[in-house]
Amino acid sequence: MLDGVLIGLATAFSVQNIIFVIMGCLVGTFIGMLPGLGPMSAIALMIPIAASLEPSAGIILMAAVYYGAIFGGSTSSILINAPGVASTVATSFDGYPLAKSGKAGKALAIAAYSSFSGGVIAALMLLVAAPYLASVSLSFQSTDYFALMVLGLSAVAAFAGKGQVLKALLMTVLGLMLSTVGTDQTVGVPRFTLGMIDLVDGISFLLLVMATFALSEALMAIIKKVDESKRDAERKAASELGSMAVSKDEVKEMVPVIGRSSVLGFFIGVLPGAGATIASFLAYGTEQRIAGAEKGKLFGKGSVRGLSAPETANNAAATGSFVPLLTLGIPGSGTTAIMLGALIGYGIQPGPRLYIDQPDVFWSVIVSMWLGNIVLLILNLPLIPYIARVLAIPSRFLLPLILFFSLIGVYFVSFNTFDIQLMVLFGLAATVLRLLSFSLAPMILGFILGGMMEENLRRALLINNDSWSFLWERGLTLTILLIAAACLFVPMLTPIFAKMRQKTKGQPSAD
Amino acid sequence: MFLSKDRLGGLLLLIFCLIYAWQSQNIRLLPFQLNSAFHARTMPEMLAALGIGLSILIMIFPSNKERFTLSGLNWPLGLAFLVLMSIYGFTVRPFGFLLSTSLFLMVGFAMLGERNILKLLLVAVPLVVAFWALMNYGLSVFIEPLPFFLRGDGNA
């Protein structure tokens, strides 16, 4: 492991990569701060630039953008109560009341210290967990990989939220369907190309991500009428931050919260599909319960614990979500799915072999996480009063610019104007689905995993002489599939059982 | 409420899945694949069946019974932007990056309420020129800057 860390340090600490980390953190903070644009859009917008770099530099840049965007999302949650992403919603519960009471600077500092600690502790846990899991997963066969992908997709649906399981599953299937467009990988037969040469290579991953996130976010902002008086109030809040000093008592209050939330966030992040949102809410809820009656009452009114817990947990979970990506090649969240797509674009196949075949990529990502967190703390925090001015850009200028960067980002990779038309079509479809409250992240995950899933299933059947018996004959495959089934059916059946219990309680006993 | 958000979404996706299922039957199978357990149609057929089943389930058991409405949304403006983006796609090559992008941005700003022509020009043009220079000289990504009538090579 020490050798690996040294390789990572040597790669991440080159002048070029340090510049990319600083640049990525700044750009990520900038984009993440814009209401509506989250880490997924931020990373998607950076892919065309990252594609022109060597793999480790490109991945370091994207990882830095990721942390930067989470940090930026927290800033807009605290200053203007407009979380850029779901994972910073819990941050606004106590961050915004603090900002309203004139302590915006303090709230931002607490958030930054908590994010930093959560990120650093989780990166340390990743350092230990990733190589171990990678060595275990070396014994995995294609049947297990197929089962793991089924687990990843079902977990995403299972964690989608109350009443959302069926919709998330359908969106996953939609993503899998889109992944089948293009030439079949084995026999070279065109599928769903509708006779168009432009579709023979399939749908570009970047195009789909840009259209479904960046483009549709901007379109949603365009069709929802903006209240300019509210925007003026936001600009005023962003310009008056107050002191950023944190008192000794507040630090004492934060330390145990950071410890607990880091561990909780990391483990939630490792679970496929759970991600930073669930981690932040769970940490918030846990701390509220632990705080006791008196301190618990402060939650939602500007509690230091209430701000520190979700901020620590969402950063720890963001780091934790790299574990399945780096060791199994299976993304645990929409954001890591985009990073997986970018890695595949480099010709790198994440998974247990990455640790052995490309240790520079594997270790430099881990080391760059520390570097990224340090940059966020020492560079971005003092710069926040200036970066926050991005919130003052009028939306009439900002939105067409987002559309332009999305379109040109895709066009600069393919130089095919057909892609722009296809983006418009996908942008329209994504906006309609958003208006109908269908989540798009499971679709991206399905799209990314689709090709690999089909390939592993095909290989598994080939090894097993065209017999599907591998699904129940190999113990590991069966166990993973049973966990996947449990992930799907337990949340679906829980309300039914709860209703049955209620009915039984309501009826008089038969005795 | 029949056309709730979930039901409408389920219906639209059901139509998509049915078209997908129909198109999956047009995938050509090679003679040696006909009797194999896994061929080019296997995955699409499984997905089509799953997709159809799930969309029907969503329509039968909708979790969100809120009715879909376009009121309060400026959807004509959204559609206008989609048309603008499509036109940009058609013009970026013949009219060159600088002209087509500057026009795209200026029209976009104007559509969202900016009426000061000087501001339109001062925001769009320098930004487009700077972006083109960054891509061309900084990242070595070349894109034709000039419109076809100024190129002098006769290529549109």
Image (cartoon, rainbow, N blue to C red):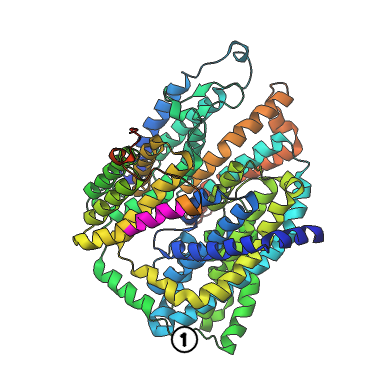
Q: On the image, numbered disc 1 is attached to which residue?
A: A243
Dot 1, crowdedness within 10 Å: few (<14), some or many (≥20)?
Answer: some
Q: Position of residue A213 (x, y in %)?
A: 43, 50
Residue A323 in view of the camera: yes
Q: Nearer the viewer, residue B139 or B112?
A: B139
> Which residue does the image show at 35% across and 46% down from the upper left?
B97
Over which residues does the magenta segment extend? B126-135
Location of residue A234 by image quarter: bottom left
Q: Position of residue A94 (x, y in %)?
A: 46, 75
Q: Position of residue A500 (x, y in %)?
A: 50, 50
Residue B64 in view of the camera: no
Location of residue A478 by image quarter: top right
Describe residue A224's horizontal placement relative to residue A415 as left or right: left
| A348 vs A465: above or below | below
Task: State whether the magenta stretch is mostly helix, strand or loop.
Answer: helix
Q: Residue furthest bottom?
A: A248
Q: Residue furthest top?
A: B31
> Which residue does the image show at 21% across and 59% down from the upper left?
B113
- Residue A205 falls within the magenta-colored stretch: no
Please tell me how many numbered marks the rendered image carries. Answer: 1
- SS for dot 1: loop
Q: Amino acid at mark 1?
A: Ser
> Which residue does the image show at 41% across and 79% down from the upper left?
A99
Q: Position of residue A473 (x, y in %)?
A: 74, 31
| A136 vs A70: above or below | above
Quadrant of the frame with the N terminus of chain A: bottom right
> Which residue does the image show at 56% across and 24% down from the upper left?
B42
Q: Nearer the viewer, residue A297 or A67?
A: A67
